[in-house]
Amino acid sequence: MTANRITGSPLRKTLTRAAMVCTAAAAVIGLTGTNAMAAGDWDATAANFTLNQPDWYAGNSANSSSANLVFQSDGNLVLYANDGRALWASGTYGQGVNHVDWSASGYIKLQHDNDTICTIGKLNSAPGGRAVVQADGNFVFYQANGSPAWSSGTNGLSQGTADYCAS
């Protein structure tokens, strides 16, 4: 008994061509985006400012290609560069903060149970926006229309505020 071979068959040729066309199309689409980044760079959405966005608890994080936003067990929300440097921090360590509330209004509240310890971002209504840890190391709140509403000021992995909530 001999095995059926599809080498050289019309079906194999058709499937091979289709795979090559799909690969080429995906490459073209990826290269023509308006916000094209260098290979290996990516942003990370930390949260969407909606009613159903879950709160963050200790250990939750969002990681871009160059920076990591982490809610630590000590109650501090910290943005780290991949080399371990703290670029920005809420400065709420040891104050009893036990969760991050991503408000549907476009800002975040660092809370101990139901008491707000610190508010980060602008207090203007911006439902539908999102919080992004960008590939350039900046932590930014965007409004639904795409315009920035608040930033950690750490673009280019520059040093931002180490004690935001105390200022």
Image (cartoon, grey):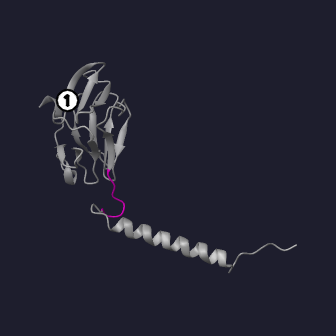
Give the main secondary structure, helix, strand or loop, of the magenta stretch. Answer: loop
Left/right of residue 11 with respect to residue 75 in the rendered view? right
Count numbered badges in the picture: 1
Residue 31: x and y in percent read 34, 68
Taking 146 as reference, is 26 left or right? Answer: right
Q: Quadrant of residue 60?
A: top left
Range of residues picked out in magenta: 37-43
Q: Quadrant of residue 114?
A: top left
Q: In the depicted view, which residue is nearer to us: 163 or 23?
A: 23
In percent of width and height, residue 155 lies at 20, 51
Q: Which residue is mark 1?
A: 119
Look at the numbered disc 1 and give the secondary structure of its residue.
strand
Quadrant, the C terminus:
top left
| Farthest residue, direction top | 114
Q: Is residue 49 magenta?
A: no
Neighbour tally class for label 1: few under 14, some 14-19, many 20 plus, Cα within 10 Å: some
Residue at (19% x, 49% y) in the render: 147
Q: Is residue 93 visible?
A: no
Q: Is residue 34 above or below residue 137?
A: below
